[in-house]
Amino acid sequence: MTKRLSKILIAIILAGCACVAATAVTAAGAAPPPAARAADVRERINIDKDWRFAHGHPYDAQKDFKHGLRPFFFAKAGYGDGPAAVDFSDAAWRKLDLPHDWAVELPFDARGNTNHGSLAIGRNFPENSVGWYRKVVHIPASDQGRRIALEFDGVYRNSVVWVNGHYIGTEPSGYSGFRYDITDYLNVGGDNVIAVRADATVEEGWFYEGAGIYRHVWLTKTAPLHVAQWGTFVKTTVAGGKARIDVDVTVANDGKSAQSFTLRQQVYAPDGKLVAQAEQAGRSVRAARDGEFSAALTVPDPRLWSIEEPNLYTMKTTLLQNGRVVDSYDTRFGIRTVVFDPDTGFSLNGKPLKLQGTNNHQDHAGVGVALPDGLQTWRLKQLKSFGVNAYRASHHPPTPELLDEADRLGMLVIDEHRMMGTTPEVRGQLERMIRRDRNHPSVIIWSVGNEEWALEWKAPGPHLAREMDGHVKRMDPTRRTMVATSGSGKGVSLEADVIGFNYGAQHDVDRFHRDHPAKPAMMSEEGSTFTTRGVYFDDPARSHLNAYDRQARPGSSLSIGEGWRRVRERDWMSGMFVWTGFDYRGETTPFGWPAVGSQFGMLDTTGVLKDTAYYLKSVWTREPMVHILPHWNWAGREGQPIKVHVYSNGDAVELFQDGRPLGRKTLVKDGQLEWMVPYQAGKLTATAYREGRPVATAEVATTGAAARVALSADKTDLKPDGTDVAVVWVNVADAAGKIVPTAGDLVGFEASGPIRIIGVGNGDPGSHEADRPADRHTFVPLSGWRTLAVDGAEHPAARSAAVDTSSWRDPAAWLPPTAQPPLTPYLVLRGEFPRPVLAADGRAALFIDRLDAGQAVYVNGRAVEPAPVDGGLMIALDGAQLKDVNSLAYVVPTPKDGVQGVFERSVGTSKWGVLRVTAPAAPWQRRVFNGWAQVIVQSTAQAGEASLTAKSPGLAPAMIRFQSGPAAR
Ligand code: GAL
């Protein structure tokens, strides 16, 4: 190690070579070498925009767009059929941007799975359980010679991907990111068709999981010599005022010859300054191989990453050939030390820190599992607002963006693998999680199992856990492993480094600690209470349960307060993760249908804090606060005693009713206060004290009748990028502007200008209102295709409503070239479709293709002029003119290759015509639930002023303005 801080000595271990070289590097700040052509250097392109979507079918091939029918389709490359074929016409499909969750657009149905939120998806709803996505991407000629990979962050589930009609791969799990190098299948200098079929018939978890491409999709373009996917691993150790930064790099050479290069590492500090640099010249990787390289750098006076100061460094890895940059890859990391100690619990950077955590699923009101990045950020901030410092991604890896944001906000994360196992498939998923996430400072531990009941106390459980632990350590020796356990069988958890206890009521944790003094521990789940936001008297008929903290299921779970007290009293217990932070769809305990949402959360599904979140705020934060529950609108209960609870981080609280003191009470540690107060309209006020001095006050007051709608947003300036979101609160207030805590009015929403509404919610676990109304298209294929060779464009064979086509030629019947009939100047092509069944506001349209420039089209013998829609031609149908059987006829100039040619170019006949029947989306509307609802709005790609209006019968309307992009001057 050099003694001079401006120079860094690096140790280089060359892959496949026993030699160790030491290189002194130039001082930080050396001039960068010339960049290669732009096309040589890495590009990562988000391709979420402009996909086409349609529902397919798990087993009915007709409803699955005739997919899987073509001979050889899974035997020969390039035989993808139906939507997997390049020529398939998707002009009639819905256009949408990702991320997308089609399950949240479906209606609720008693035959759905309550664990998944009783939406009409799964085995009982085959017509809703398969989704197809298609997209065309242009690959410019300048990409010739590059490697191009298609990367999905997650598709729920069982996704099959085709590119240009070629089968590319299958990923069974809905939670693992996956990547295909598609270079060899691409049409460089032209358009390329990506088709994805997802099948959500079978579920993975026991909670709402959504359906579809609900995470981002990327194209990554690199030179053949490049840093492999997730190909860096930055490890940090701090000693003597310096940080040692060890970096491992996997360099992939997808070229046909060995490549030599210079590998440069540069560390940039949080302020953007270059603080360390190392360079290894003369490195090489053989053709079609990966090479592993390592370097060590030193960062003087490191700024540590912590929850209060989440300082982030960047490691820039550069590959140079002949002085030109061929790849440049940034890895963000933090310098921090994490310890789980059996006696002192968790510590960060040497300081003990109780984990104040929540468990969360990826699920939010309105949008289901398809969370825009901004909404994930917003959710983390809501959690932080009441003192949460840790997040358990239950029970699968989160999105990469959630971890990016946790890094930025200083939120600690338990990153969790989906299922225990060591087979190539399961292990591959574990490996991908670790390689993807191991540079995030927020990730403090790998959870490799949760309540694996089939293995917890018997073979092969402990063995599997040991194997997985070993595998994790080989990929990441810097972090510990954990298995969360619910029962007495702790064999599995004992094989991991840290035991995660799910629910204190189900374990004798003190005895465990005595018996296993060397085992660090945490409460990986605690609470599991049931509370409905804003409800104070149980109303099981509406699936509502009161919001006072209590033991929900004595014997198997504790109250939030009791759970926390037990953790706080034990230094050796690293912390507690409440089950859950946010409410989520499904797991409707203790109710079944018609409840559709869980009630375990500290916040409802929209992110309104429930009272228990304020309890946690009182024990997890120091800024003086006091909170009173319930609200004070109890008309009809006049004179009856109402249970009033107060949470505060003061040491005493005094309560007043309409100014009259009801007594001052002292708070015991982790406790809460209770008064019984006879109701009368008016107000309750609480004053919190510390050492006799008032430090905070709160008030609940009886409101007037609902008078108006009110809108407020977390922000009104949006980026005009088509992804940025604002979270809009919708309240119903009295004439004085006070939120009416019992209001349940129905509010309608309209957006104008460059924003769109992407979801609505209200946090009511019993609500069956639509979160995300969407157009529903069904498709009826045209059938009975026959062709007739004719001499002129004007022929009665096309112009008649009904024609006997029994003697016409079947275009699907292949004839050897020698048996082809002589070519005539024109062809008539006739097909038929049944009368569509239309809902009252339903629409029907024929989608056809331009088979030839000179074509004429007839519907039931009447000439029609189809309107061009993006990617096809549309004929809107007038329901009154339709019959039981209807005809579509084309007259086209005969192509040189005759009928067979027309047929071949219209694979599966999808381009000849499909009947689209549309049930249009219901309008955007939602009842407020106990005074609150939420609308999530998203920017479009245009800049300008936008507004959202909210109207409710009998109430004054509200409007909120947004500015998307720079304001017009
Ligand atoms: C646990 C489980 C969680 C959730 C919770 C409900 O057993 O790990 O996913 O189901 O119970 O109380």
Image: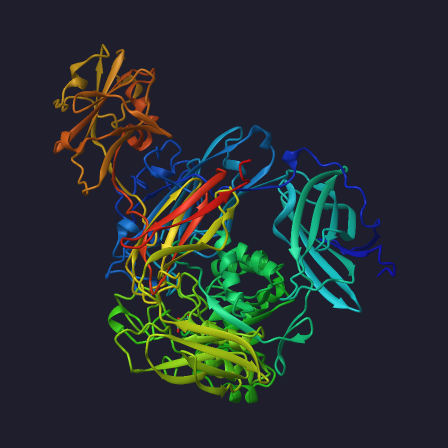
Q: Nearer the viewer, residue 96 or 156?
A: 96
Horizontally, residue 127 falls left or right of residue 216, namely left
- Residue 695 visible in this rendered orientation of the protein: yes
Q: Residue at x 31, y 54 (%)?
A: 747
The picture places residue 154, in percent across and down from the top left corner, at 46, 52
Above-or-below relation of 463 to 373: below
Residue 889: quadrant of the picture:
top left
Q: Residue at x 45, y 46 (%)?
A: 961
Horizontally, residue 554 falls left or right of residue 232, namely left
Horizontally, residue 220 falls left or right of residue 731, namely right
The residue furthest front is 659
The picture places residue 664, in percent across and down from the top left corner, at 48, 86
The residue furthest right is 3
Please identify the quadrant where the N terminus is shown. Answer: bottom right
Q: Nearer the viewer, residue 373 or 263?
A: 373
Please identify the quadrant where the C terminus is shown. Answer: top right
Above-or-below relation of 346 to 826: below
- Residue 81 visible in this rendered orientation of the protein: no
Locate ligand 1 by image quadrant: bottom left
The picture places residue 574, in percent across and down from the top left corner, at 57, 77
Residue 784: quadrant of the picture:
top left
The picture places residue 794, in percent across and down from the top left corner, at 21, 12
Q: Residue at x 54, y 57 (%)?
A: 432
Residue 685: quadrant of the picture:
bottom left
Give the tally of numbered discs.
Answer: 0
Q: Nearer the viewer, residue 71 or 472?
A: 472
Horizontally, residue 576 falls left or right of residue 853, namely right
